[in-house]
Amino acid sequence: QVQLVESGGGLVQTGGSLRLSCVATGIVFGASTMGWYRQAPGKQRELVADMPSTGSTNYAESVKGRFTISRDNVKNTVSLQMNILSPEDTAVYYCTAYLWGRRFWGQGTQVTVSS
């Protein structure tokens, strides 16, 4: 059974930083594309960043230069360093794993940026 467990969300002021982490179990982590999505109230879930097993990275335009995704294939973790946060980044952030045609989701962690 695949489990993705996020941590690190919270409340931060505009311009601040947060680091999200996700531990994955029950999946071939090294072969998986790991990533982060977010969903703000009243909006569709959107890709924030992802990182295939090759180590390349893909970012939403809105977070380029501010967010950094990384993965540790030994600890089976994926992290998202978020800097220069703004109220527009307020959302529930979901860890995701994609492998062999299937996508798996974590339970989500709330990030709130106050103005």
Image: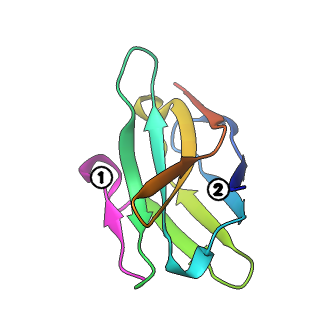
**Residue range of the region highlighted in magenta in the rendering:** 55-65
Residue drawn 51% across the image and 30% down it: 91
The mark nearer the N terminus, 1 or 2, is 2
Q: Quadrant of residue 58?
A: bottom left
Above or below — where is 103 with respect to 69? above
Q: Is residue 102 visible?
A: yes
- Residue marked by disc 1: 60
Residue 59 image offset from top left, x and y in percent: 32, 59
Q: Which dot marks residue 91?
A: none
Above or below — where is 24 with respect to 103? below
Residue 60 is covered by the magenta coloring: yes
Looking at numbered disc 1 in the image, what kind of residue is underneath it? Ala
Give the residue at the far left of this rendering. 61
- Residue marked by disc 2: 19
- The image shows a total of numbered marks equal to 2
Residue in front for this viewpoint, 55 or 114 = 55
Looking at numbered disc 2 in the image, what kind of residue is underneath it? Arg
Residue 28 image offset from top left, x and y in percent: 61, 75
Give the structural element (helix, strand or loop) at label 2. strand
Above or below — where is 30 with respect to 102? below
Above or below — where is 72 with respect to 46? below
Tell me: 36 left or right of 74. left
Tell me: 52 left or right of 61. right
